[in-house]
């Protein structure tokens, strides 16, 4: 038996300045030029429209207005937003799937999914700008922001444009990030979170924009038609998707962070969205929102996986959370919005998560082990309560009921951010065992596009993983087209204290990266089995030998093999802080926008009338 020791330092590879450290400059220049052209073109159209030198933009907006029963500056924005969010989401899921199955890109224009993401984000920014450009001789709602003497813009339009700009800024920052820190192939890279966070949170801006439009048309407030009600439910379904994209790695089965984070994220997204949907739109709205989200997720997964030949993802259902919210709404508590939201969040984070676990156990690669529940509930319950209360605040704005006094509403929002940050920080805490090894014996199996092996594993110490761990598995990914579309996971069979074996052969050839993973409690560690040579980052092959004993190392050094750790420790913290500040600024802007709209429109729904505000 050969003795091979792999330490973390041996897996931290120097960047060669090539494909492992950012996009080629010609691609960055191309994107920059395209951005400039689109921006200039948008400004030129805005000038022509506002000086009445073109009529086609208003004609299109008027047609959308007649169809959606909203002012033109809202209706056209809503139409473009639907295409925007579907395009960006499809590109995002496809992009993640390609990275899992094939590895990193040679640049932003080398991956077809990036074109959908870029187009979607550009359209997101354009959507917000359209809502700002279109109003000419009117003040679009009481809360409208004054730009010039005769130009007022809706708050929701500003928020959507700001969210789109925030996401777009993530693209050049992402390249800077990769040039400094290497290609961290994880969804939770700070600049990646900017891209998905801007798109996801933009749904709040869209909901506020729709509300501004509903209240801005003079005359009596008419009840929504069934079609409009369904479309508004779809907006909340989109918000549920937007807040759920942060756990997409869990949906694919390549989560690079502890499993305990997944139920917390599900509880927060479901509580915030479904509480707001039920209060605003009434009976069955929560269930319809979940159904819309599920249909979009299912169609996207079908197209990306079986149709395009990339790894297929599953997704959380949230049906149990919707049911408990609908049942709670049958009680008198619905009249006390914030209390309803807090109790609803509590139920989502307990009963709802238990119901969700049945779905997770049935379709996900990694079910939720019983041993995880105490910590999972300790994280999910406060997040669910806070998020549910926040969802109730949003609902009060969208129903013209006004926010509680500033001390209360601000406390709820700040507490929600703090609780989510604290739960996330706890979930990110991991430990790496000292002097722990895995002895791996490989047996040749029938080839499938290359060398395949069965594995028997002996972990020392044997109690490194309990009888009920989050996972003890072998992950093989980034193998390219062929077996499993470049991605397979084998949850190992336990054969005795500290001993395991595979159910199916695993690949150890070509571009596959195959590793043993262990996650139990706070322990999160891995042992490489086979790593190919990678000239782009100056990495040598780590061969899969017949028998070896290798050290357990931080999993990140294998999963994020292209990442560069050769930089001052403060630099990573400072760069992450910049992204955090930008994110908090976006959240603050959304809270400010909701507060402004609430202050200026409170009571309009109660009187049942709207006013005509003209600008002369």
Image: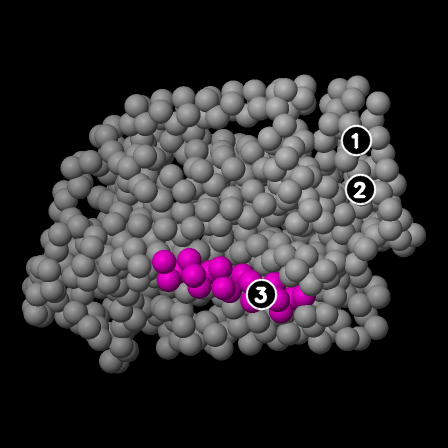
Image quadrant where residue 267 sits: bottom right
| Residue 300 magenta-highlighted | yes
Residue for badge 3: 290
Left/right of residue 88 with respect to residue 76 in the rendered view: left
Of the residues under marks 1 and 2, which one precedes in the sequence?
1
Residue at 19%, 73% in the rendered image = 504
State the CA–CA distance, disc 3 to disc 2.
Answer: 29 Å
Residue for badge 1: 138
- 3 vs 2, front mark: 2
Image quadrant where residue 363 sits: bottom left
Name the disc covering residue 216, or none: 2
Tell me if residue 372 can be seen: yes
- 1 vs 3, front mark: 1
In the picture shown, does residue 158 fall above or below 68?
above
User: CB atoms at circles 1 and 2 under 8 Å apart?
Assistant: yes
User: Would you say the magenta stretch is mainly helix, strand or loop?
Assistant: helix
Left/right of residue 196 with respect to residue 438 in the rendered view: right
Work out whether residue 550 or residue 598 is closer to the camera in this orientation and state it: 598
Q: Give, as a single range, the part of the protein colored magenta.
A: 285-303
* Element type where label 3 sits in the image: helix
State the CA–CA distance, disc 1 to disc 2.
Answer: 10 Å
């Amino acid at each position: 038996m050969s003795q091979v020791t792999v330490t973390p330092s041996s897996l931290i590879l120097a960047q060669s300045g090539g494909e492992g450290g950012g996009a080629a400059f010609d691609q960055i220049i191309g994107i920059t030029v395209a951005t400039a052209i689109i921006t200039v073109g948008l400004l030129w159209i805005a000038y022509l429209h506002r000086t009445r030198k073109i009529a086609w933009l208003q004609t299109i907006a008027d047609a959308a207005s007649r169809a959606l029963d909203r002012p033109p500056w809202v209706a056209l924005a809503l139409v473009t937003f639907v295409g925007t969010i579907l395009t960006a989401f499809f590109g995002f899921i496809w992009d993640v799937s390609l990275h899992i199955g094939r590895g990193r890109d040679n640049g932003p224009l080398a991956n077809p999914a990036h074109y959908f993401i870029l187009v979607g984000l550009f359209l997101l920014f354009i959507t917000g700008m359209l809502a700002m450009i279109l109003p000419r001789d009117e003040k679009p709602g009481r809360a409208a922001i004054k730009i010039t003497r005769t130009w007022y813009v809706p708050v929701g339009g500003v928020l959507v444009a700001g969210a789109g700009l925030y996401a777009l800024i993530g693209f050049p920052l992402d390249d800077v990030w990769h040039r400094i820190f290497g290609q961290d192939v994880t969804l939770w890279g700070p600049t990646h979170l900017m891209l998905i966070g801007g798109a996801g949170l933009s749904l709040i801006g869209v909901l506020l924009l729709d509300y501004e439009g509903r209240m801005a048309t003079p005359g009596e407030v008419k009840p929504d038609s069934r079609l409009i009600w369904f479309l508004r439910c779809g907006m909340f379904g989109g918000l549920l998707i937007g807040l759920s994209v942060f756990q997409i790695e869990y949906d694919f089965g390549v989560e690079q962070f502890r499993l305990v984070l997944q139920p917390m994220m599900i509880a927060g997204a479901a509580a915030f969205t479904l509480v707001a949907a039920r209060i605003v739109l009434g009976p069955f709205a929560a269930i319809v929102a979940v159904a819309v989200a599920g249909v979009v997720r299912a169609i996207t997964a079908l197209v990306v996986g079986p149709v395009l030949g990339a790894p297929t993802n599953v997704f959380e259902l949230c049906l149990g959370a919707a049911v408990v919210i609908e049942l709670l709404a049958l009680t008198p508590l619905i009249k006390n919005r914030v209390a309803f939201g807090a109790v609803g969040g509590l139920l989502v984070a307990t009963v709802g998560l238990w119901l969700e676990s049945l779905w997770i156990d049935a379709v996900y690669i990694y079910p939720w082990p019983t041993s995880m529940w105490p910590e999972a509930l300790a994280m999910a319950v406060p997040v669910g309560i806070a998020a549910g209360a926040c969802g109730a605040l949003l609902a009060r704005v969208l129903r013209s009921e006004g926010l509680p006094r500033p001390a209360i509403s601000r406390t709820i929002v700040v507490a929600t951010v703090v609780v989510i940050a604290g739960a996330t920080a706890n979930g990110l805490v991991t430990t790496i065992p000292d002097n722990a090894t895995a002895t791996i014996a490989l047996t040749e199996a029938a080839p499938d596009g290359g060398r395949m092996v069965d594995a028997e594993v002996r972990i020392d110490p044997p109690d490194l993983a309990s009888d009920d761990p989050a996972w003890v598995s072998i992950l093989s990914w980034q193998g390219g087209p062929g077996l499993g579309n470049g991605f397979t996971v084998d949850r190992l069979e336990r054969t005795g204290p500290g001993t395991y074996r595979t159910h199916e052969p695993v690949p150890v050839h070509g571009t596959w990266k195959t590793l043993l993973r262990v996650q139990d409690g706070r322990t999160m560690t891995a042992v490489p089995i086979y790593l190919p040579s990678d000239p782009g980052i100056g990495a040598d092959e780590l061969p899969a030998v017949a028998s070896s004993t290798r050290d357990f190392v931080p999993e990140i050094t294998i999963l994020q093999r292209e990442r560069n750790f050769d930089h001052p420790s403060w630099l990573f913290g400072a760069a992450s802080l910049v992204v955090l500040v930008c994110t908090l600024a976006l959240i603050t802007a959304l809270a400010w926008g909701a507060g402004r709209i609430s202050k200026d429109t409170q009571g309009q729904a109660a009187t049942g009338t709207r006013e005509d505000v003209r600008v002369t």
